[in-house]
Image: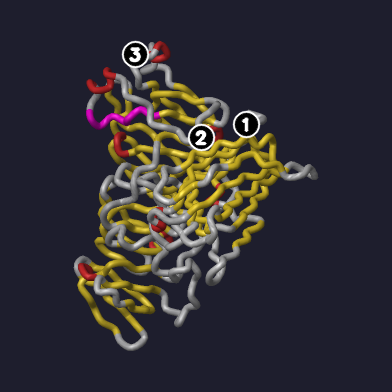
């Protein structure tokens, strides 16, 4: 049986002799097959090529001159998403993030010094915010403690949070070196950027979840974003040492280059694989015993924090508070479902739930294709693999396991459906 979560392949002893900047070999999961010990050489909209990295593998003979060619749409994922950035990070409007510090921010352009990609000039329309550290999550500025969105008090274009906890509603902001110029309703003034903990430009907008195929890339510094292509620009012993990436930012393309070892994970959404965390659900129902209903959290935890379970992260995440159910229409029909699920880190040792996955096909009665034992807070994430058998709908059900639903906050890392028919 296939494993639901792709683990990093063990490095062969011969790999230790490769240059330090060569890409680390990982397992490549495809819709219908896997390849071990490979690194990407090129990834484009239609085709991708991969190099076998394990010199001791019988398949590696002649690998330096004969790469494996694979249709890009068949890629599920390669590698593992890293932890979120440990320092300053720029939030992108499509849900991506780039680890780096802002040099300047004006009306049309935001310049950052990124950790892995060097100096980047980003279109301002592609940026939705900034966080000085992981202490402030990607959605914390916009959410109440119960996960709901408060009404806006003013039409301000930006919300700035300072290290002392003060919040400033601004019409415009401009970042230049060590100074942030703020134009607020009452007055215009400047503050040192060292006391800026976070800001959001306007309200967070939903990511572009069009049906078109998107290539997702993750770097070792915690960055992850949509790219249009990847290609090797330098190699050593047949393996890439430098790669060029083309970032897809709000309908604009931005060229960047990094060491091959910095690229640690890739995934394709919208081909054979669809990430549920990037789709609008057909139905979402949640009822709480105490307080208002919790909304569905996409791209962040239910509390607005960075989505992570015991160090595991992902490209696309769902936060679901029990008791709840969320249903998605699947077109084309899907053959299997994969995800990593746990009680969110914010619950500590609290929370207890049971997970069910239901599949619907045409007019047939819903089928239960997966049910978990009780999942408790602080327990290890559960890897889910469910065979869907050409399902046209999938429903994720989260039930409270104990007497109450307190802290029953589940986080689903990279929940995805995969279609293998017609490959």
Disc nearer the start of the sequence (2/3): 2
Q: CA distance from mark 2 to mark 3?
A: 27 Å
User: Can residue 43 be seen from the camera position used here?
Assistant: no
Question: Is label 1 in a helix, a strand or a loop?
Answer: loop
Q: What residue is at 60 percent from the left and 48 percent from the top?
A: 211
Residue placed under numbered mark 2 in the picture = 4
Q: Which mark is residue 420?
A: 1
Residue placed under numbered mark 3 in the picture = 56
Left or right: where 262 falls relative to 351: left
Disc nearer the start of the sequence (3/1): 3
Q: What residue is at 33 percent from the left and 36 percent from the top?
A: 243
- In this rendering, which labeled residue sits more in front, label 1 or label 2? 2
Residue sitting nearer the eye, 333 or 177: 333
Quadrant position of residue 91? bottom left
Magenta residues, start to end: 20-26
Q: Is residue 231 above or below residue 52?
A: below
Question: Is label 2 in a helix, a strand or a loop?
Answer: loop
Left or right: where 282 falls relative to 200: right
Q: Residues within 10 Å of mark 1 (few under 14, many from 20)?
A: some
Q: Residues within 10 Å of mark 2 (few under 14, many from 20)?
A: some
Q: What residue is at 34 percent from the left and 58 percent from the top?
A: 90
Q: Quadrant of the N terminus?
A: top right
Instruction: Where is residue 289? Give x, y as percent.
Output: 56, 67
Instruction: Where is residue 285? Give x, y as percent.
Output: 63, 61
- Within the magenta stretch, is there residue 154? no
Instruction: Where is residue 100? Give x, y as percent.
Output: 28, 54
């Amino acid at each position: 049986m296939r494993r639901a979560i792709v683990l990093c392949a063990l490095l062969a002893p011969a790999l230790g002799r490769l240059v330090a900047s060569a890409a680390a070999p990982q397992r490549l999961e495809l819709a219908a097959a896997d390849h071990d010990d490979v690194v990407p050489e090129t990834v484009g909209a239609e085709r991708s090529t991969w190099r076998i990295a394990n010199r001791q593998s019988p398949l590696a003979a002649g690998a330096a001159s004969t790469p494996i060619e694979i249709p890009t749409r068949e890629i599920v994922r390669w590698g593992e998403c890293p932890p979120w950035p440990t320092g300053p990070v720029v939030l992108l409007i499509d849900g991506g993030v780039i680890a780096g510090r802002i040099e300047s921010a004006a009306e049309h352009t935001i310049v950052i010094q990124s950790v892995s990609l060097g100096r980047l000039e980003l279109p301002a329309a592609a940026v939705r915010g900034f966080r000085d550290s992981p202490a402030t999550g990607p959605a914390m500025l916009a959410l109440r403690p119960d996960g709901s969105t408060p009404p806006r008090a003013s039409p301000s274009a930006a919300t700035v949070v300072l290290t002392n906890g003060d919040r400033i509603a601004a019409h415009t902001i401009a970042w230049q070196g060590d100074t942030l110029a703020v134009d607020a309703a009452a007055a215009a003034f400047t503050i040192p950027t060292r006391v800026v903990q976070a800001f959001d430009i306007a309200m967070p907008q939903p990511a572009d979840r069009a049906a078109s195929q998107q290539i997702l890339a993750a770097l070792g510094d915690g960055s992850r974003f949509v790219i249009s292509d990847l290609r090797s620009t330098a190699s050593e012993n047949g393996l890439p040492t430098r790669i060029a990436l083309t970032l897809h930012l709000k309908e604009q393309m931005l060229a960047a280059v990094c060491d091959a070892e910095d690229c640690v994970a890739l995934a394709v959404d919208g081909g054979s694989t669809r990430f549920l965390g990037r789709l609008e659900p057909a139905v979402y129902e949640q009822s709480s015993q105490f307080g208002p209903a919790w909304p569905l959290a996409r791209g962040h935890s239910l509390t607005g924090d960075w989505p992570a379970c015991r160090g595991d992260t992902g490209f696309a995440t769902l936060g679901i508070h029990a008791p709840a159910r969320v249903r998605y229409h699947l077109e084309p029909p899907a053959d299997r479902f994969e995800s990593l699920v746990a009680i969110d880190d914010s619950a500590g040792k609290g929370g207890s739930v049971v997970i069910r996955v239901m599949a619907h096909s045409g007019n047939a009665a819903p089928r239960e294709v997966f049910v978990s034992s009780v999942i408790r807070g602080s327990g290890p994430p559960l890897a889910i693999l469910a065979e869907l058998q050409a399902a046209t709908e999938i429903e994720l059900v989260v039930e409270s396991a104990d007497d109450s639903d307190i802290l029953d906050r589940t986080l689903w890392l990279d929940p995805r459906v995969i279609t293998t028919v017609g490959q």
